[in-house]
Image (cartoon, rainbow, N blue to C red):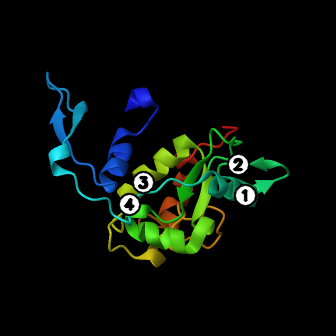
Amino acid sequence: MRKAGHADPPKRLSDLKSWGLTFKTSRGEGGETKKYSYELDPSKYVDTQADGRQPLSKAERRKIMQQHTVNGVCRCRFCQVKLTNASFAGDHNIPLKVAGNREHRRIGVAAFGPICTPCNTQKAHYCKQCPNHRSDGDLDFCRDCYLHDPTNAKWSHVQGRSRSETEADIPNIFRTASG
C-alpha cells in the first residue's frame, strides 16, 4: 500500500474492508511488531455496504475547495498550508465511523472540510483514540470537538478531554505551515 502512495495503510485497509473486501492478516517475521502483510481473501467477499466510504467526485472536491477559498487560496483547516488540487483531501467533519456515509451524503459537501494529508492522518489518529469513535457514537459529541471544526470558537473538548486540559496541546497536534 505504501508503494501506491498511502501514508496510513491501516486506514486504507479499513476503506477496502468497507467496500466488502476481506483480508488475511499476518504479522511480520523476526519479531517485527509493526510489520504486517495483507492478503486478499476472495472466498469471504461480502457485498459492499451502502454505508461504506465513497470517494468524493471531482465536482464535490472542487465545490469544497471553492467554499473554503479566501483571497484565491484554499488552506488546510488545521495547519493552514496552501492546498492544491493534488494535495487536497476532503475531511469528514464527523468521522465516517460515527456518522456513516448516508449522513455525510444527506448533508452534502458541507459535511467536509479541506485538509492536507499529514493533518488528515493526525486527525484520524486522534479520532480513533476517542471513546466516541464507534458506529453508535454521538454526533453532537463530535460536533463539540475541536477536531470537528477548528474555526468554531465554541469547541469544548478533544477526545472527551476538556478544553482547559487540551487547549495548550493544540499547536502540538497540528503544526502550522510557518512553524
Q: Which residue is mark 1?
A: 68
The Cα atoms of the two marked residues, 2 and 1, are separated by 7 Å
The disc, 2 or 1, on the residue closer to the chain's N-terminal end is: 1
The disc, 2 or 4, on the residue closer to the chain's N-terminal end is: 4
| Rendering coords of residue 97 (x, y %) | 37, 63
Residue depicted at 73% across the width and 57% down the height: 68
User: Answer yes or no: do the residues labelled 2 and 1 have beta carbons within 8 Å?
Assistant: yes
Residue depicted at 59% across the width and 44% down the height: 116
The Cα atoms of the two marked residues, 3 and 1, are separated by 23 Å
> With respect to residue 7, does 95 lie above or below?
below
The Cα atoms of the two marked residues, 4 and 3, are separated by 21 Å
Q: Nearer the viewer, mark 2 or mark 4?
A: 4
Amino acid type at image mark 4:
Gly
| Rendering coords of residue 55 (x, y %) | 50, 53
The disc, 4 or 3, on the residue closer to the chain's N-terminal end is: 4
Q: Which residue is mark 4?
A: 52
Other residues around mark 4 within 10 Å, as few (<14) / some (14–19) / many (≥20): some
| Rendering coords of residue 167 (x, y %) | 55, 60
Q: Is residue 5 left or right of residue 78?
A: left
Residue depicted at 45% across the width and 62% down the height: 95
User: Answer yes or no: do the residues labelled 2 and 4 have beta carbons within 8 Å?
Assistant: no
The Cα atoms of the two marked residues, 2 and 3, are separated by 21 Å
Residue at the right extreme?
71
